[in-house]
Amino acid sequence: MTEEKRGMRRNRRWSWREYGIQLSVVILGVMVTFVGSGLIERWRQSRQVRATMQLIADELAYDQTQVESVCERLRFDLEGMRLFERYGKAVERMPEDSLVHYLPLLGAMRAPAFRTDALEVLKTSGVIQSVNDKGFLMELLGCYGELESFEERVDLYNRRKLEAMNHFLASEASAGFSRLAPREAWRRMLEDPLCYSFVDGSSNFFGDDGEAYFDRTAARVASTVQSICQRYGFEPTAGI
């Protein structure tokens, strides 16, 4: 065998070897790229979930203040209606200061203004698919569902109150109402059938123990906010 032929064999042998090395490098590079891309995507999703949960926690913290504010107004109403129950709606026997104190009962209304923007981000951005703990996710969505139910009940309560007041204000009995003494004002309002029906039948509108219902709703929101903060290691921004 000539020297030229032996050189060609050596070159071919080295070429196959180099090809194998290069192929291994390419395969390894592709694997690293895929693994790296997966890690980067998981990191991106984790950051997106955390950012969304921060918004959720802040939103629910705000909604909790709304629940507490509305419940304060509703507690006032329930206390007044129960006082009228104890006196059998007999205005002439009720203390004057109580009649003055509860005069706004049939006028003032307060409805919650809940925020749900962060919830919509969670649902529409695809982040919800990246939340691994489905039990936690159900807790979160359940909290929003309870707030929606609470808002609907308060809205119905306010509509009943408004209907009663509009019926009274459309009657002749409301003439000169603003100049009446509290006892006479209440006597006229309770002579109106819708006003009487509202005061007589709304003390149990939120259940036999309305205060307990208010406490449970507020506690549910507070518990969910705390659960989010513990899971993701941050505090909500109060009052946003």
Image (cartoon, grey):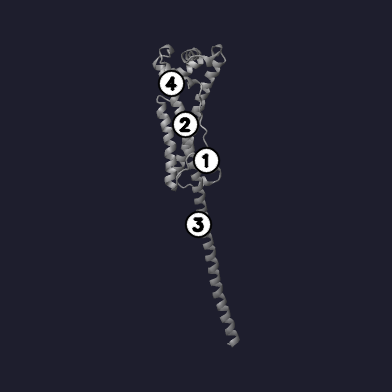
Disc 2 marks a residue whose amino acid type is Ser
Q: Secondary structure at mark 3?
A: helix
- Which residue in the protein does label 3 denote? 39
Pointer 4 local density, CA inside 10 Å: few below 14, some 14–19, many at least 20: many
Q: Which mark is residue 119?
A: 1
Q: Nearer the viewer, residue 182 or 36?
A: 182
Could you classify mark 3 by the number of other residues whose Cα lies within 10 Å: few (under 14), some (14-19), or many (20 or more)? few
Q: Amino acid at mark 3?
A: Leu
Badge 1 amino acid: Leu
Query: Cβ–Cβ below 8 Å for labels 4 and 3?
Result: no
Q: Nearer the viewer, residue 204 or 239?
A: 239
Residue 41, placed above or below residue 201: below
Q: CA distance from mark 2 to mark 1?
A: 22 Å
For disc 2, the marked residue is 69
Give the amino acid type for the residue marked by disc 4 in the picture.
Answer: Gly
Q: Nearer the viewer, residue 38 or 101?
A: 101
Q: Which mark is residue 80?
A: 4
Cα separation between marks 4 and 3: 61 Å
**Disc 3 to disc 2: CB gap under 8 Å:** no
Q: Position of residue 123 (x, y in %)?
A: 53, 42
Which marked residue is nearer to the observer: mark 4 or mark 1? Answer: 4
**Relative height, residue 154 to residue 84 (above, below):** below
- The quadrant of the picture occupied by the N terminus is bottom right
Q: Secondary structure at mark 1?
A: helix
User: Secondary structure under badge 4?
Assistant: helix
First reached walking from the N terminus: tag 4 or tag 2: 2
Determine whether, in the image, residue 113 is placed left or right of residue 90: right
Instruction: Of the two numbered discs 3 and 1 on the same chain, state the one appearing first in sequence.
Output: 3
Q: Earlier in the sequence, mark 2 or mark 1?
A: 2
Residue visible at 52% across and 46% down? 127
